[in-house]
Structures are given as C-alpha cells and as structure tokens.
Image (tube, rainbow, N blue to C red):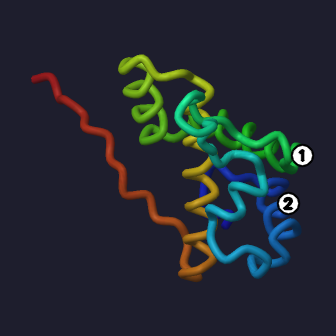
Amino acid sequence: MTSIQELGAISVISMIVYTDCFVKFKTWRQFASYCGIAPFPHQSGSSINRRNRVSNLANKKLKSILNMCAICALQTDPEIKDFFNSRIEKGKHKMSTINIIRNKLVARAFAVVRRKTPYVVKYEIDTLEVM
C-alpha cells in the first residue's frame, strides 16, 4: 500500500488496523461507508428529494486521515488534480469532489491489497514542446 504515493505511513497503518488486515470488509465500498465517505440518497417517498449526503455515524478519525490524504493527492498527483479542476469547472462542489477523491484512494488501496501488487501510475501528462 505504500506504493500509492498519496497514502502515508499513518494512513496505511490505520487502514490495516481498522480493516483487520483487510478481512473485516469485503469491498472498498463497505469500508467507505464505515469511514463516512460513501454518499447516501436523502429522500422520503416522493415529497423530499435532496442531494446525497454522507452519514454522521462514521469513524471520524479515519475520515480525517483520508481527508488529509485527499488534500495531499490534490497537490501531488496530476491525474487527481486534473480530475478536480474539471469537476470544479463543471460547477460541482469542492467538498463533494474531495469526497470522490477519498473514495478513489480507498479503492486504490483495496485493489493493491487484493491483487498483491504495487500500484502502477498509468497517467501521463501531455506536454507540448515549443520549437
């Protein structure tokens, strides 16, 4: 998991401890729900239809660690930075985009553990050479 650049030692150890070496949760979505970063629809019948919200019944300590990882990813990962900027240009909220980034990091961590291979960066920055 340390091959994922945005996840530091504290976040990796926290995820290992809270997932009980990744056997407590079957999928990354279950773990995201436990962390409080999975959005749930907020509706009641046909009269109340509001935007999706995250649950308040969450592990706040783990959520804050993942939040710091997401902010770090915004500064260091060009793929995530481009994703963030494109969503903001479309008029999406910053916090909902950061929540998506948190989910991406959790999904990457679970994929690395399940495959038992290090994370491989496939995103390349297109550069224009001026002649």
**Residue in the image at 54% along x and 78% along y:** 117
**Residue in the image at 60% along x and 53% along y:** 105
Label 1 secondary element: helix
Residue at label 2? Answer: 14
Label 2 secondary element: helix
Indicate the amino acid at tag 2: Ser
In the rendered structure, which disc, 2 or 1, sits on the residue that comes first in sequence? 2
**Residue 44 bears which disc, if any?**
none
Which one is nearer the viewer's eye here, 7 or 14?
14
Residue at label 1? Answer: 61
- Please tell me in which quadrant of the rendered image residue 42 appears: top right
Q: Are marks 2 and 1 in contact (CB under 8 Å)?
A: yes
For residue 11, side relative to residue 119 (left or right): right
- Mark 2 burial class by Cα count in 10 Å: few <14, some 14-19, many 20+: some
Which one is nearer the viewer's eye here, 29 or 55?
55
Residue 109 image point, x, y percent: 63, 64
Indicate the amino acid at tag 1: Lys
- Please tell me in which quadrant of the rendered image residue 108 appears: bottom right
For residue 91, side relative to residue 44 (left or right): left
